[in-house]
Amino acid sequence: MSADPFAQTATFLCGALRQPRQMLADQKYDGHKSIHDDAMAEGLGLRAGPIEGPTHFSQFDPLLFQTFGEEWLRTGCISAHYQNMVVEGESVRAFVERPAPGATFVRLFAEKADGTPVLTGSASIGDANAHPHELQQRIARLRPATGLVINRDLKVGQRGAKPESIRMGFDQHMGDHYPFTLNDKLKVITEPSAWYTAEGAKTSPWGRPIIPTEMISVLLGSTIAEAGLSGRKPAVGLFAGQEIRLIDGPLFVDQDYALEREIIALSESARTESVWVRTKVYELPTRKLVAEMILNGATMKASYPRYEEEAKALGLKA
């Protein structure tokens, strides 16, 4: 993992402008294309299929490694609220607050070349629960969801329908949700690292290749359909916020893991209904808890064809 110096202001480290690549144009779920398909996105009023939010996490990895050192890869937590979508061809820059000596928590953000905000959030090492992370603050401010239509059958505390076992190999196709391989991603990742590769990882502290932070989202998302924690269909969703926390990291290529999922919040806005799911990651065969992810999966009301009809039947305002 590179720790090369980055541009600095009085208060922030900042990375170079990067142009992340779109990898999900062929993504499918529930028998239809996703919001990352241009035609689907345009039908919902967007100008093109957006790049998936956690793709931007790669731009923070070297900045946070410089800030926190190797501990970032062991107990790092990144928590982000996605603000504006990015399409392929747009440039993005990441910023990380310069911490006081000994501090273990920082604020961060990303913006486009023209200053348009992309995401805002926080990062830490050590006990993530000791800090006011972005998603934890947002969950604490949620009001009870009283007008759900798409997600009305879901409950806070509901757990995944079945155990999930996963792994990620270099040439393993990750399914319809993620129609590419780790090797495909490593060819275009915005911030390469030798520690992501089989050869380069031989000199890492672990002697084996690690999964990039953005690909942890892919690993945990590849089997999410098995959990049965989505609302009524057909409908199109997007990531509105995400937190990835390493407890005993990093996560490794060709390592087996087990997942447990639970709905921790339900919410709504004028245009979306959200399911907030915590996924716990256990190493196999030890069953050691090694990571967690919180994902705010927002479903667009306009994408559900029976939304107005069912809202009316429930006595709700469409």
Image (cartoon, rainbow, N blue to C red):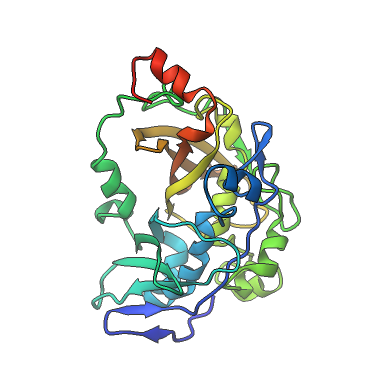
**In the rendering, at what x and y percent does residue 105 appear?**
29, 65
Location of the N terminus (image quadrant): bottom right
Q: Nearer the viewer, residue 43 or 174?
A: 43
**In the rendering, at what x and y percent does residue 130 appear?**
25, 54
Quadrant in which residue 112 is drawn? bottom left
Q: Residue at x 76, y 56 (%)?
A: 171
Q: Nearer the viewer, residue 169 or 284?
A: 169
Residue lying furthest right: 171
**In the rendering, at what x and y percent does residue 42 appear?**
58, 48
Residue lying furthest top: 313
Quadrant in which residue 122 is drawn? bottom left
* Side of 238 where 252 appears, left or right: right
Location of the C terminus (image quadrant): top left
Q: Nearer the viewer, residue 302 or 296?
A: 302
Number of disc labels:
0
Q: Residue at x 52, y 24 (%)?
A: 232
Q: Is residue 246 above or below residue 12?
A: above
Q: Is residue 74 above or below residue 195?
A: above
Q: Residue at x 30, y 67 (%)?
A: 106
Q: Is residue 63 above or below residue 145?
A: below
Would you say residue 35 is visible in this rendering? no
Q: Nearer the viewer, residue 169 or 47?
A: 47
**In the rendering, at what x and y percent does residue 11 appear?**
27, 79
